[in-house]
Image (tube, helix red, strand yellow):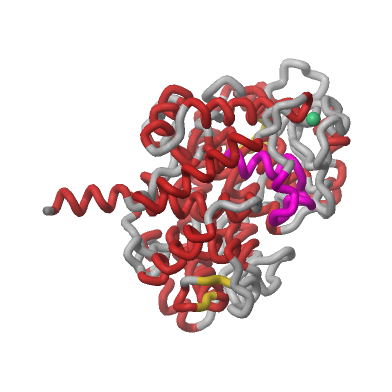
Amino acid sequence: MSTAAVRQAPAWAISMLVHVVVLLSMALIVSSPPPKQVASIITSSGPEVEDEFTEFEEDLPDQPQVDTADPTADLTVTTEVEVTPVEVVSDANDLDAAPLAVEFTDFGTETAPASDMMATMGAVGGTAGGLGGRAQAGKLAAASGGGGDTEQAVDRSLKWILQHQMPDGGWSFDMKECPSCGGKCSGSGGSRAKDRTGATALALLPFLGRGYTHREGPYKAQIERGITFLAQRAVAGKGRAYDGNGNLYSQGLAGIALSECYAMSQDNRLAAPAQLALNFIMQSQDPVGGGWRYDPRQPGDTSAVGWQIMALKSGNMAFLQVNPLTVKKAVDFLNSVESENGARYGYTDASTPTAGRTAVGLLCRMYLGWKKDNPALQNGVNFLAKRGPTDDLYYDYYATQIMHHMEGEVWISWNKRMKEMLLKSQATKDHEAGSWHEGFDRGHAAESAGRLYCTSLATMILEVYYRHLPIYRTQMVDEEFQE
Ligand SMILES: [Zn+2]
């Protein structure tokens, strides 16, 4: 089929995508093999893109038919995508649970109503009513502890990230590889420097967090190229969005970015890539322990599990299919690494709890349904609050979200220290202006993924005021309403 024909028939393409999602949903419920489907995907023409994806060529049975001779060819083409069902690995108990577990309200043992989960996403733009980008973000920031200073810092950061977009639309942790930088910025990543998927997802998330997508805000064209880069990787890898330089950490980040962008933009072209990425995450879960690590089906670690749970949560809020059995097993993993009744979390077992792992574990628990008055959650929150923000932005990123969901004094105190530290430490000179790295380079993955990683985390921390509304806010309103 020619590109022109697709342009003339968007309605059926969109309709077909909806059917793919519906069929996927049915496949999960009835566990019978679904028919092969044809889906429309995002892909783009141009020689750079083809060069970038040569590494995937061996795995590509159906190359997108792109007419590279036509300079007017737009981003939409079709290709055949075989949407594979989630392979459910389960024991007898899980099978017993399956007929009941088709609703996301079973996401955890004491799950908040689904409406609470929905309320936490898209506060700025996107699905929660398209409240309208910049002005709304400013209001929400001011209402929960941010302000003009944090918003300006976010704007400076987004500009720095844009300056480091690669010619192929993606990003690299290696500043030296970026033609516009060429290493003028220090802090090129170390062992993760070549992971383009992780870098691109981390670069895009602060834009999405600000309410900007390829359909809204001042950076539509740049975001379109970035999200296309990720979508193409997810489709080319049949869900696996990373190459030999990445791992399941990259996959989790790509899953979050694709799901959030799909939910916020309501661009149906992203439905299949996002669902494929989530399917790969679900297929890659350790069938025994329920965790994730670097490679599919390895016994898990808390850090990798955190990104996958965030991806599944984002997918759920985007109305993509998330298998409740996957979530149930992820809870099993968290149980296996907890201590002090769930107030502390270790890495691959319960033996080595740290503040960073505890922050990841507790945020996962909150998303999986733990209530604010849960004693273990309160114990853990007090532990993190006493410690306060540190020079480890990974820990800060998770802990800040926890404190924001808790609200009240613990949040006010945390936020004051957190934003002061970030506003003080944002780079102001030369090419580095707007980014973060100095002072944070010893934190989790800060050395291996470098300045882009630190900048992404710091920016998302400063977007906490509006990126996700507190989980418990709707619940509180409901309780007040009942009184
Ligand atoms: Zn630079």
Q: Which residues are magenta?
A: 439-459
Rendered location of residue 167, percent (x, y): 80, 28
Is residue 324 something that shows in the picture? yes
In the image, is residue 259 above or below residue 133?
A: below
In the image, is residue 143 above or below residue 374?
A: above
Most distant residue in the left direction: 483
Predominant SS along the magenta part: helix
Is residue 230 something that shows in the picture? no
Q: Is residue 111 magenta?
A: no
Viewer-proximal residue among 425 and 354: 425
Which residue is located at x 35 percent, y 61 percent?
Answer: 372
In the image, is residue 197 above or below residue 178?
A: below
Q: Quadrant of residue 466?
A: top left
Rendered location of residue 49, percent (x, y): 80, 33
Which residue is located at x 66 percent, y 25 percent?
Answer: 159
Q: Is residue 458 magenta?
A: yes
Which residue is located at x 75 percent, y 30 percent?
Answer: 432
Left or right side of 298 for 32: left
Rendered location of residue 288, percent (x, y): 61, 79
Viewer-proximal residue among 210 and 324: 210
Q: Quadrant of the N terminus?
A: top right
Left or right side of 231 for 326: left
Which residue is located at x 49 percent, y 66 percent?
Answer: 327
Left or right side of 85 for 342: left
Q: Quadrant of ligand 1?
A: top right
